[in-house]
Amino acid sequence: MQLNQLETPALILDRVKMDRNIARLKARLQPFGVVLRPHVKTAKSADVAKRMGTPDTPITVSTLKEAEYFFKHGWSDILYAVGIAENKFAHIADLVSRGAKMTVVLDNKETATTLARFCRDHTLTLPVLLEIDTDGHRSGVVPDDPALLDITAELERTEVAGTAWLAGVMTHAGASYDCKSVAEIQAIAEQERAGVVQAAERLRAAGYAAPVVSVGSTPTAHFVQSLDGVTEVRAGVFVFFDLVMNGLGVCDQSDIALSVLCTVIGHQKKKGWLITDGGWMAMSRDRGTAKQAVDQGYGVVCDQNGTPIPDLVMRDANQEHGIIVHRHDASLTPMFPVGTMLRILPNHACSTAAQHDGYSVVAGTDHIEAQWSRISGW
């Protein structure tokens, strides 16, 4: 099948670009001697995950549906990297009973207490990572907070059968997404590393083994200068990249492996609008580039081959209609004929991919070499 035979909108994945992106991060991290634990929430696809490594590769997930899916496809070393809630304990226990090596995350005494009790009551041996807040971006305990030891006092110091035990610490440098320069990303990367290592050292001084020190974000993974004291790096969107990563200077637009194929279905010539059948239900509502130096609207417009068309963006979107306009002057919008197929580069690959149930895979041409499914939901 060729691209022009697809019903639109459709999610297009360039395998060549994806493989290059994966190889780039692996090469970047190799000198540091750390484990790459990719975050599969971006792709939610076993076919994509296979390009990152065999099922022996440790992975990160953001939903237990992802954990189930990847476990059924052969992956067993799984970090569920969202603060665990009591209503998920039984599901975690079931996965472990079937052979999954699950690790969970928490950042408060209440959850530590209830999880420890559950593990004792159900003879469940479960490694736990304490989430550390290294940038004020999200959840977690700051490295020097006295609560660090209060929380972990509810957990075993080392692995003991039938208990929840403190396996280490993890953090996510979400503030890196707000950086304005590579130098700022490098500074956040060092702040991330230093903070989580400090937390690990406090725990070890208190008698906890804390063997795992886990950091992660795509920007910091690409620009970090030291990973001393870190054991693993998590990153997700690196596999596809997107316009936010491009705006941060992490990648070029030519590295973006994901796009949405849509079709011109009409014009509003007086307004300088091209109307397509790909609205925000195809692209998502994510406007992550709006706070960057260059606002890309809902996405950068490319021709059917994936080559960006200068200054053409999806400026607005309804549920099933995309409005494409010249960035600076609507009178310069090229009025492509009805039926013309265009590809839109997304602001945020994770949220755009989440709007679709699979990938049409190409390798730099119009030929579709495979259809890869993906999951969604919780």
Image (tube, rainbow, N blue to C red):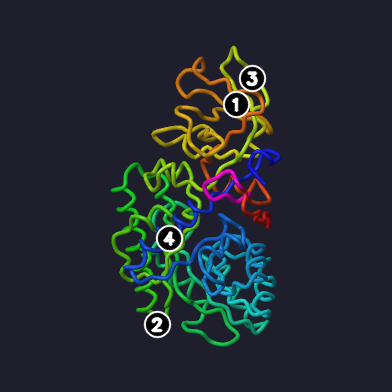
Quarter-of-image position of residue 205: bottom left
Q: Looking at the image, is mark 4 or mark 1 nearer the viewer?
A: 4
Residue at 50% over, 82% down: 156
SS class of the residue under badge 4?
helix
Real-space Cα separation, disc 4 to disc 2, in angstroms: 39 Å
| Residue 323: image tag | 1
- Mark 1: few/some/many CA within 10 Å (<14, 14-19, 20+): many
Q: Is residue 361 magenta?
A: yes
Q: Which of marks 3 and 2 is in front?
A: 3
Q: Nearer the viewer, mark 4 or mark 2?
A: 4
- Of marks 4 and 2, which one's residue comes earlier in the chain? 4
272 above or below 260? above
The disc labelled 3 sits on which kind of residue?
Answer: His
Query: Callout 1: helix, strand or loop?
Result: strand
**Of callouts 4 and 1, the N-terminal one:** 4
Q: Which mark is residue 207?
A: 2
Which residue matches tag 3?
267
Instruction: Tell me the kind of residue under disc 2.
Output: Gly
Q: Is mark 3 on a helix, strand or loop?
A: strand
- Looking at the image, which is closer to me, 152 or 131? 131
Magenta extent:
360-367
Label 2 crowd bin: few (<14), some (14–19), many (20+), radius 10 Å:
few
Crowd class of label 3 (few under 14; some 14 to 19; many from 20; radius 10 Å): some
Magenta: main secondary structure equals: loop
Residue matched to label 4: 23
- Give coordinates of residue 314: x percent, y percent: 55, 30
